[in-house]
Image (cartoon, coloured by chain):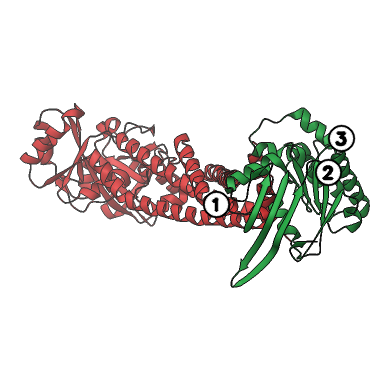
Amino acid sequence: MIFLKIALKNLKRHRTRSLLALFGIATSVAVLFSILSFNKGFEKGLAKELERTGIHFMVVPSGCAHEVASLVLHGSIIPKFINMAVMEKINNLSGIEFSSPILVAQLPNPKEGRVDLVYGLEMSRVAQLKPHWLIEGTIPKDDHEIIVGAEIADHQGLRIGDSVEYPNVNTTFKVSGILKKTGTQDDAFIYMPVKTAQAVFKKPFGATAIGVKVKDPAALTGITDDLAERVPGIQIVTMNQVMSSISTLAASAKVLSLSIAIIAIVVSAVGVMNAMLMAVFERTQEIGMMRAIGASRADVFRIIMKEGMLLSLAGGLAGILVSVAGNDLIEVFVRKVMPYAPAGNMAGFDTTIALASLSFALFVGVLSGLYPAWKASRIHPIEAIKG
Amino acid sequence: MIELRDIEKVYRRGAEELHALKGVGMEIKRGEFISIVGPSGSGKSSLLHILGCLDRPTTGSMKFDNVNVEHMSEAELDAIRRKKIGFVFQQFYLMPGLSVFDNVTLPKVFSKEKIDREKAGALIEMVGLGNRVEHFPNQLSGGEMQRVAIARALVNDPEVVLADEPTGNLDSENSEKIFELLKSLHMKGYTIVMVTHNNNLAQRADRVITIRDGRIQ
């Protein structure tokens, strides 16, 4: 207890120096904590998002595996199409609950001076394909009715009943429903019946992908193997594969960001070591006095180690607090460097990660305290009586 | 109690050899009040280091309570300092963040012994700081800080109190008071060894040891 008091007081004696060292630790722990939180949130968010798609696998033209990941999460445009005749073969397999075609394409909107993203799907399947959707208004019943995503509705000031004109394809649509903000890429699409989309894009039997839901997820492998054998020229991508391929893509970003955090921590550890070494040198006589009045080398070692640990623990705590407080700002940054960042608030506060970051800070404190503490323990007691 | 025989202390600085003590022999008996005087560079500090078990002689022998200490390990010397010697320093060296009470009982922390609050309180009372127990060093005058240091030197019931220029940083009035305090400890039976530049105070000890060029005169 007294050792702790001494250590604390020593840190306070060199307030600026201690604060600077603490700031270094806090910054690097904040980065580490944020990255770990995001990594965890990323996996969770991804799993949640995939779960939301309401299907078990997708059938796409062969050679489009990565595009499927994009399709699922970003709604990207796949330049190849699959013939809807495949659906029949899929439906003939046993254990299929349903299959549903999806057609994604771009449609110029000269009035707004932009290109709209169109997502064609079977309106009767909306509840199954997009179970999390909240729609204001109604699901289109007519061929020329559409649902618009929240972003589009906001941006173009669309309301239910409004008309949207696409002169390039000579078609006018009526907004029957507005999708409430989902926080995902879904907000940026215009949804229309897949048959209309096929007609508009002149692909009467084309689909970007066919989403399939099976009755029993445990039988998934058997079904996909069976399908691959029967239908050549297609590629089957399960949601698990999508998840793992996205995770692989994200892995390098994670490694990079973690490396940055580790380097930051090493630099701040050097800062702590430097601050403590200076403090030890300045206190040579005082430490000599402690040795003279009976402190063993181990006692001195312990006092200095406590300083390093206090400094790094305080820094670690401050870092976590800063990270939690600046969560949103950091999230914006992480979204820029991470591919396929899932929607929603990724970095929630996670006690395990907080404790792990704190332990790591403590570990760094111990490491950076070792040398100064050893140096201090070598100070000779005669330093107290020199001259 | 302490017996020095043919003590030599040689310091090496590169190729240069510094002969700080040249065959010193002396004895300190229990209950004595001794002052050690000598010009700077005379070997005064080296003698104090050896008396205080802070350093080992190059050659010669030293007995503390009839036990030879010249070949003891550092840890053994730590233990002797803890149990048998109380130090008072010129710069007081109180721990700035600790109260008077915590400073006085610091040696107990190092000796891993239970703190006897009553006894520590009595010591603080004895050095005249009974009303300052919870004060911090920065709230004390120089003379008061040295009193705290003296109480700290006594807390482990040492055989001998070694005071290195205890009045060196004090004005004459406070010097006198500190000297009187040491003198009163002597009256109570403590063995006191005081190194000083102050000839006037030195002459008032029971015995004055003068050292010059590494030899006792």
Residue A130 quadrant: top left
Q: Indicate whether A163 appears above or below A217.
A: below
Query: Disc 3 designates what residue?
Result: B131
Q: Nearer the viewer, residue A111 or A52?
A: A52
Q: Residue at 74%, 39% (x, y): give it.
A: B158
Q: Residues within 10 Å of mark 2 (few under 14, many from 20)?
A: many
Q: Are marks 3 and 1 on the same chain?
A: no
Q: Which chain has been coloured green in this picture?
A: B
Query: Disc 1 designates what residue?
Result: A374
Alpha-carbon distance for marks 3 and 1? 39 Å
Q: Are marks 3 and 2 on the same chain?
A: yes
Please, which residue is most extreme toward the left here? A230
- Residue A75 at least partly seen: no
Q: Secondary structure at mark 3?
A: helix
Q: Dots 1 and 2: beta carbons under 8 Å?
A: no
Q: Nearer the viewer, residue B113 or A247?
A: B113
What amino acid is found at the position of numbered circle 1 in the picture? Answer: Trp
